[in-house]
Image (cartoon, coloured by chain):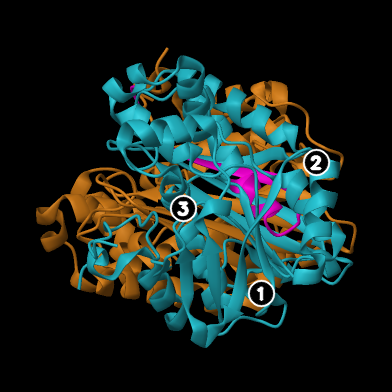
Chain colours: A cyan, B orange
Amino acid sequence: MRIKDLGEFGLIKRIGRLLPPCSGDVVVGVGDDVAVVDTGGKHYLLLTCDIQVENTHFLPSVSPYQLGLKAAAVNLSDIGAKGGEPLHFLVSLALRAETSVEWVDEFYRGLGEGASRHGADIIGGNLSHTQGPQVVDLFLTGRVKKEELLLRGGARPGDKVLVTGQLGNAKGGLFLLTQEDLREKLTPERAEALLTALLTPTPRVREGQAIARTGKATAMLDISDGLAQDLLHICEASRVGVRIWAEKIPFSFALEELGQLLGTPPWLLALEGGEDYELCFTSPAEEAEELAEEVERTTGIPVTIIGEVLPQEEERWLVTPQGEERLLSPRGWNHFREAKDGS
Amino acid sequence: MRIKDLGEFGLIKRIGRLLPPCSGDVVVGVGDDVAVVDTGGKHYLLLTCDIQVENTHFLPSVSPYQLGLKAAAVNLSDIGAKGGEPLHFLVSLALRAETSVEWVDEFYRGLGEGASRHGADIIGGNLSHTQGPQVVDLFLTGRVKKEELLLRGGARPGDKVLVTGQLGNAKGGLFLLTQEDLREKLTPERAEALLTALLTPTPRVREGQAIARTGKATAMLDISDGLAQDLLHICEASRVGVRIWAEKIPFSFALEELGQLLGTPPWLLALEGGEDYELCFTSPAEEAEELAEEVERTTGIPVTIIGEVLPQEEERWLVTPQGEERLLSPRGWNHFREAKDGS
């Protein structure tokens, strides 16, 4: 069997089953975005890594400054999604010998800026030569107060589903990056907004911490693979179902204009699009509105209730703006295969 | 300027200068093999990573089981070289979609075995697709009692220089791997020993801990780039010079036989060869022999005094078996360029 037949998430599950059980200090191991270790104090130690490969995650033409900023953001987002405080980066780079030293300077300028915006330090790493696609792999530690840790597995039937910000902008940016003609048809500042969302996303670190501090959230993750796919992660880890209302999914005017050009409803782009790095979280129904208001007030970022958690046997549903209920498909970003089920 | 013009170590220095200063909890940042963080308890937190790229660090034909074992060893060795205890691995993989799932299984079998031999857990990671060379990047945390931490920068003039085990076997293995005819000329069990040293090196974790516990060592690192290159790291960090006695450098009968076939003195292969993952450390002259005996006794691994630390202005010297003093050159493993100075 090839990896592409099993897919990324199938492979992760297989690896999880292969590994021997962890020591008692490991609170969360393989399977979440972040590993959680109990080092004995008031905080848990958080560990995460994200590998970015040329031609898979970024084009050779991307500016190294933007690449550094984005690589930082992707990791910071993981720590933020646990309610955590980012601490220390290690940086692994595989570079071609012909790459200019100025490229490396600019990459580190972006990375350093991204890290310092959230109080994190770059404290080490590893350099290697490659003859193929360049690779950027960041490792980030963080910490979270034990009582504030949020995982994927805490959602309960009756909870509401909430998201920060607007979804789908990064997917919009990807359309513009790969289809030059589309870009020319869109209002310039809107095109710019979509491209910025893709190339230099803003990790919701302060928002994640604010959500965790309220004590009113039950589960959380960052939307890296697309809302539909990441909801599935929450449903699997929490053993619940979900109902999402398409008309509640927040999207930008820019995405709306792009949707018109593409003949695709913007909520569908927002539902399927990956790399938004907004947060998706759950909260008991009676506390969800108060939580949303509190986080909006302290962070200035809009928070929207987009659905509700169901018992597992009621499965996963999307309610279209026309009121039709459709089975929610896990379509999202899979690194090894395209969704072929036509969903 | 291209990376190949600056070289790996030049680039690391440049990056170190670019980065903003770290927070007060960072004891050791960019420039050592391991970053050291003070989290407030009795131990320091150690963080390291090592990226392995297909065609740069390993051939496509290597067994994934051996690759997993070696990737673990490279990182475990870094923690051991600080006197530390390995704790938690994260695993970043960039794989081709056509790679078999069984390849991944075997890789994790090797990695898991390597980790568990030293009490470390695999607790997370990240999978990505690549269309180019496959990449294995491991992150490893560890801890060390604050009073037992050993760095590169503690060597003092008058100290002795010591190494564990035998040097150059991995370089011998590389000759055999790349020159089929050589392999056939060597005694089979000796060929096997050299290849094993290259493909599945034994990290000196217990030895590093034993050395640190004696309280008699002043500086330490693992020999990954070759003794000559790694001695230079100690000399730079400690601001000292060094004199190494070629006839004291420990090597195997297998390397001696290979040296005869190649027409190269085995001590020169041992001096220049990378990837041995033995430990090189320093100790005050009056304590060095006792330290060597103590570590040999507790670990069963031979320890050899091979040189002495000089004041910085006396520079770095190699005494050949014929008694000639030659300037020691930093020839070693540089990922981005070949040594061209004929040294």
Q: Does residue A166 lie above or below A289 as drawn?
A: above
Task: Indicate which disc residue A271 carries.
Answer: 3
Q: Quadrant of residue A312?
A: bottom right
* Residue B159 in view, yes or no: no
Q: Are marks 1 and 3 on the same chain?
A: yes
Residue drawn at x 19%, y 71% is B188
Please tell me which residue lies in front, A287 or A204.
A287
Task: Indicate which disc residue A299 carries.
Answer: 2
In the displayed image of the protein, which residue is found farthest to the front?
A322
Q: What is the count of numbered marks? A: 3
**What is the three-letter code of the residue carrying label 1?**
Ala
**What is the three-letter code of the residue carrying label 2?**
Thr
Expressed as whole percent of the image width and height from the top left, the position of residue A70 reads 54, 35
Q: Does residue A322 lie above or below A28 as drawn?
A: above
Please tell me which residue lies in front, A150 or B79.
A150
Closer mark to the observer between disc 3 and disc 2: 3
From which residue to which does the magenta span run? A75-98
Q: Residues within 10 Å of mark 2 (few under 14, many from 20)?
A: some
Q: Residues within 10 Å of mark 3 (few under 14, many from 20)?
A: many
Expressed as whole percent of the image width and height from the top left, the position of residue A134 reads 37, 36
Q: Secondary structure at mark 1?
A: loop
Residue drawn at x 75%, y 57% is A83
Between discs 1 and 2, the one toward the N terminus: 1
Task: Indicate which disc residue A155 carries.
Answer: 1
Please tell me which residue lies in front, B289 or B21.
B21
